Amino acid sequence: MVIGEDVEPLKPPFDYAAIERILPHRYPFLLVDRITEFEADRRIVGIKNVSLNERYLSHAGGGPPVLPFTILTEAVAQVGAILILAKPENRDKLPFFMGIEKVRYRRPVHPGDVVTIEATVRRLRSRMGLLHGVATVDGEVAVEGTMTFALGARRKGDATPRGRV
C-alpha cells in the first residue's frame, strides 16, 4: 500500500493499533491509548492511561510518582497530530512540533489517572497549523496551551504508518 492511497473516512473509536497506523511513534513514545471523538479538521479527543510501569515517571522529592509535564505536553501534541494526519492528503507527511504558547500546567498527573486530551483546530493551512490542547483528569485541567506545527514530506527511511485505518 502507498501511504496516502487509503482515503476512506476515519471513524472513532480508534484503538492503539489504529493509532499506530496513523502516527510514526512507537512504544514507549506513543503516548495515546485511544481516540474517542473525531471531527475532521475541527477537533479530536484522546485518552492516555497512566500506569505505574511507565519508564519516564518522575520520582523526585520522595513523593508519589508524577508524569512529567513535558511528556504530558507531547501526549497533547500526538493527539493533535492524529487529527492532522487523518486527512487523506496528509497521510504521507510528517508533522513537526514547531512551538508552544501560553502553556499552563495546573495539576500533577499520577499513575492510575486517566487523562482526557482534547485538541481543537485554531488555524489550519496546507502546511502549517495551530491547535489548542487541553488535558484533564477527572474534569480538572492538568495542562493547556496552543501548539504550532508544520507538515513536511517523509524522507526515505523515515518511520511510516503501517496498514490501513
Image (cartoon, rainbow, N blue to C red):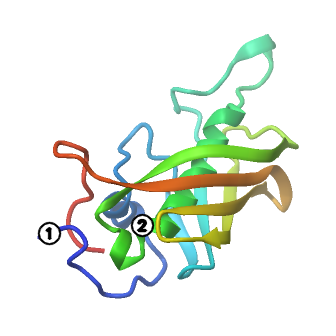
Q: Amino acid at mark 2?
A: Leu
Dot 1 and dot 2 residues touching (CB under 8 Å): no
Which residue is located at x 44 percent, y 84 percent?
11
Query: Residue 159: where, in percent of width, then height?
Result: 25, 46
Nearest the viewer among 83 and 147 is: 147
Q: Which residue is mark 2?
A: 85
Could you classify mark 2 by the number of other residues whose Cα lies within 10 Å: few (under 14), some (14-19), or many (20 or more)? some
Residue 39 vertical placement versus 142 (above, below): below
Residue 126 vertical placement versus 79 (above, below): below
Residue 165 vertical placement versus 68 (above, below): below
Q: Amino acid at mark 1?
A: Val
Q: Quadrant of residue 91?
A: bottom left
Q: Which residue is mark 1?
A: 2
Q: Is residue 67 visible?
A: no
Which residue is located at x 24 percent, y 53 percent?
160
Disc 1 element:
loop
Could you classify mark 1 by the number of other residues whose Cα lies within 10 Å: few (under 14), some (14-19), or many (20 or more)? few
Disc 2 element:
helix
Which residue is located at x 51 percent, y 26 percent?
55
Image quarter of the N terminus: bottom left
Query: Residue 138: where, in percent of width, then height?
Result: 81, 59
